Amino acid sequence: MYIEERDTIAAIATGMGNSGIGIVRISGPLSISVADKLFRGRKKVNEMNTYTAAYGHVVDREGEVIDETVLLLMKGPHTYTTEDTVELDCHGGSYVLKKVLERVVECGARLAEPGEFTKRAFLGGRIDMSEAEAVMDVINAESDMALRNSLGQLKGDLREKIISLREKIIYETAFIESALDDPENYSLDGYKEKLTIIVDNLLESVDSMMTTCENGRLIKEGIRTAIVGRPNVGKSSILNMMLGETRAIVTDIEGTTRDTLEETASIGGIILRLIDTAGIRDTVDTVEKIGVDKARENIGSADLILFIVDGASEVKDDDLAIINELHGKKVIALINKEDLPQKIDMDKLESELSNVGCTDIISISAVEETGKELLYDRIRELFFKGEIKVTDQIIITNERHKEALEMARISLNRVKESIADDMGEDFYTIDLMAAYESLGRIIGETLEDDLADKIFREFCMGK
C-alpha cells in the first residue's frame, strides 16, 4: 500500500487569518533539500539532527529575507506522515505565509491536497482509516464528550476492537477450510454448535457497538433542538438565555421572528443545535407564512422540541394546534414568564400535552434565567440517562462505520441461518468472509481507493 516514490508536498498548516504564528509544513523525499534552498541559519538543514530546531530566515532566490522563522526538522519514518518533514514556524500574517509557501513550491514542492498529509500517514501504515477519520473529529470537536471519544479512536480503541473481531472470524474460516481439505486431521463433529456460540458472541459485540450509534451522532453533531411556540411567548428570549448572549431580536410585537435562527450552545458537555423559529399561527402575511412553514419543518427534523408556552396568559387555540403537531417527538414544555402573575390553566395544558406523550413540563423565566438548570438536567436525562461522561465503551460516531457494522451483522446472521438450515460448512465461510471484509472497511483494510480519496478530500487543508 505504501508508495516509495512520490512528490514532496507543502501547505499552510494553521488557520488562515492573522495570528502570532503560522506554520508551513513540508513532507516528502525532497523536504530537506527544499528547505536548504530557502532557509538561512547557522547550519544547513541537511546537517541537522532529527527532532531539532533552528532559528533563521526564509529567503527568496536573490537572498532577500521573506520572513524570520524557526525551522523544525523531523526525519522519517518517525513522523506524522512517515516521511521526512520540515515545519517552518513563521509570523502568522496571511500574506507572509502565502509568500513563504510560494517560495517552498518554487524550490521543488507542490501544493498539498486537502487531507494529503493524513492520507500519507495512512498509506505509510502509521494509522488506519478509523484513526485517520478521528483526526478530523478531534479538530471539529465542540465538547468534552466529542473530544474524548475522538481521542480514544485516535489512539486506536476502535481499531483494536475491530482487529480482535476479525481475528476470531478468520480463525474460524481457516479452520473450516482446513477441515474440508483435510478431514482426517480436522474434525467438524459438533462444530455447528460451537460455531453458533462463536457467532452469537460476535453478534453481541457488533450489536453493542451499534447501540451507541445514536448517542454517537448526538455527541458528534449535537442535539438538533427546535424552539417552537405561538408568537410572543418568549422563544427568542429562551434562545438568548441558553446562549448567554443576545443573538435574537426580542420585542413585544408579535411576529418579530420571521425566519429561523440557528446557534450552537454547550451545556455540561452536550452540544445543542438551537433553532429559533417563527411563531406558529394562521397568517395571511406571505413572508410570515414562509417562516411558519419552516418552523413546522423543523418540528419534523428536530431531535428535541422545546415547546414554549406563555404562563402569563391563557392557553390559546394556536397553542393547542402546535401541540397536535408534536406526536412522536421528544418534547419538553417550558412555561415561560414565571416571574409574572400566572394565568395559564395548567390542568388543561397538562391534559393536552399528555395526549401527545409529553410529560416534561418546566416553569421558567427567560428574563430572570430561572429554571434553566432544571431544563439542562432534563435534557441530559432524555438523551444520556443523566450521565454525561465518556467511559471505556467505544462509541460509534461515524456513519460509514455504522454502515459497515450493519453489513457485518447481516453476514453473521446469514451464517446462523445456514447453520439452522443444516447447509454445508463451505456456505459458512462465504458469509464469515463477508463479515470479515465489512469490518475491514472500518479500518481501511478493504477500502476502495475512490472511497479513501473521498474521505481524505473532506479533511482541511494542511492536515
Image (cartoon, rainbow, N blue to C red):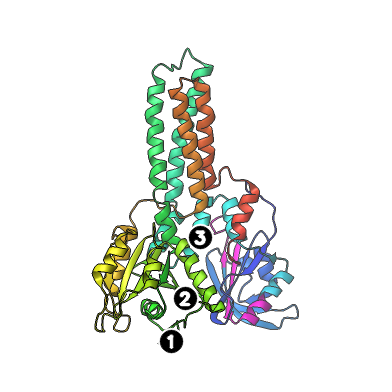
Q: Position of residue 23 (x, y in %)?
A: 58, 73
Q: Position of residue 376 (x, y in %)?
A: 31, 69
> At 49% from the left edge and 14% from the top edge, which residue is drawn?
183
What SS does tag 3 mark?
A: helix
Spatial separation of the CA atoms under disc 3 and disc 2: 38 Å
**Is residue 95 shown in magenta?**
yes
Residue that numbered label 1 is attached to: 253
Residue that numbered label 2 is attached to: 278
Q: Which amino acid type is shown beneath numbered disc 1?
A: Ile
- Above or below: residue 306 compared with residue 417: below
Residue that numbered label 3 is attached to: 135
Q: Position of residue 67 (x, y in %)?
A: 63, 82
12 on left or right of 270: right
What SS does tag 1 mark?
A: loop
Q: Quadrant of residue 21?
A: bottom right
Q: Position of residue 148 (x, y in %)?
A: 39, 61
Q: Which amino acid type is shown beneath numbered disc 2?
A: Ala
Please state which of the two labelled residues, at mark 3 or mark 2, is closer to the viewer.
2
Q: Quadrant of the C terminus?
A: bottom right
Residue 151 appears in view: no
Q: Earlier in the sequence, mark 1 or mark 2?
A: 1
319 on left or right of 438: left
